[in-house]
Image: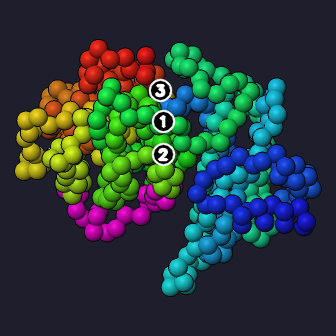
Amino acid sequence: MYAQRILVLAVLAVSASGQFQIAPERSKRLELALDEALATQTLPCDAEPTRPFLDFAFRFEIGYLVHCPLKEFGGVETPIAAYIRVQPADGTPAWFSESYRIPGIPSDLRSKFNLQRDRKDVEFSGVIASGEGEYSVELVVVDKQHRLFHRRWKTKVYAHGSETKAPVSIQPNTVEALTFPAWEHPVSERNLNRLAVLIDAVPMRADSTRLRAWDRAFLIEALSSVLKLLPSNSVRLVAFNLDQQREVFRSDDFNSHEEQRFSRALDELQLGKVSYQVLQQSQNVSSMLLELLENEVKAKDAADAIVVLGPTNRVSDKIPPELAASRRPGSPPIFYLKYSPISTGRFRMPFSTIMGMREDFTHDLANLEVGGNGEFPDIVQRAAALHDGVTINLHSPADLADALRKIHRKLRPGAQSSAE
């Protein structure tokens, strides 16, 4: 019981704001506690490792996904902590910690739930940044009732395919906490005066109802690359979610001090919560998106360029003609960086897109991007096109670097991009 108490006290001390690496002196205590506590595993969860991949900050990510039965927490809000021990084959082990909160069932609704018969799971996920190498990973999950879950596995992290051409930013046999990559740069006449970045905060998988760790990581990493490779003296950052028809985050002067606030906004985004009124007003999806773009185009402190960034949006509806607005002369250029992760050699067209084409199939073919592997436009691409926006399809970190280099050349002819 003593060992479990050590781990539980650490749970209560951990901030809910994100992941951090545990100092060596605390790691020794955790090593001793872990050896004693693992013999009494009592939290009936399950965990699955995810395949390591190169992220958009040129780091490899070692990830995991945990499922726990909802009934185990009695409908009460419960703090949970995950401790991850990563041992390189040729290196020093490191401990990381991340905290979570299992949401409780509101008191006025508890009478409607029979938790003992409920088979629903709660789910949480995490990732660790690493360089190439072979690693042994141990995951320990602990709750405030001193219950533990433990899983151990080995993983090999090596570059494959186009990843071999990318400059990995972490040394081999090295692991780090997945933090916001540094991007600050001094004010300069060579920079853009102002850059506007709109983040489409949606999952990469169209059927997902939540923003998982790797979804959040992609948005943060890709944003950091945009900020580094398109240096500007001022940045306006807006994150939005079309399912909920609301802004998730806004900063008119985004800087390194705002990074944690942006990360928390993504952590707290519950995509499964969509109001009945929102579901009734599907046309408002187009209205909100067009309003965001219009506000940037008409802004008094208009940006030199507008970058819209996100995975392919699950909504592929066409913009109603009555909502379409003509491009204003002198408007800043719009670039939509659309990430389409393709696990197979062919793009899987959304069923809603196929049903929406009907007799207008030729019009949709005209909107296909050159070199886009047969990708059909989503609603963000359609909205950007009304302002003569350019859509660039991304399938890898190398694609992002190449796209930002080309954008930089267009905006600053003759200047050398950081992506070079």
* Residue 188 x %, y %: 36, 30
Nearer the observer, disc 3 or disc 2?
2
Marks 2 & 1, CB-CB < 8 Å contact = yes
Three-letter code, disc 2: Ser
**In this rendering, is residue 37 above or below 415?**
below
* Residue 328 x %, y %: 8, 39
In the rendered structure, does residue 267 fall within the stretch colored magenta? yes
Give left or right: position of 45 versus 229: right
Residue plotted at (53% across, 49% down): 212
Residue plotted at (20% across, 29% down): 367
* Residue 145 x %, y %: 77, 71
Label 2 neighbourhood size at 10 Å, few (<14), some (14-19), many (20+)? few
The answer to which of marks 1 and 3 sits earlier in the sequence is 1
* Part of the protein shown in magenta: 265-283
Q: Which residue is mark 2?
A: 256
Distance from disc 3 to disc 2, alpha carbons, whole Å, reads 22 Å
* Residue 419 x %, y %: 43, 21
Three-letter code, disc 3: Pro
Q: Which residue is mark 1?
A: 183
Which image quarter holds the C terminus? Answer: top left
Residue plotted at (18% across, 48% down): 299
**Residue 190 seen in the figure:** yes
The answer to which of marks 3 and 2 sits earlier in the sequence is 2
**Residue 360 seen in the figure:** no
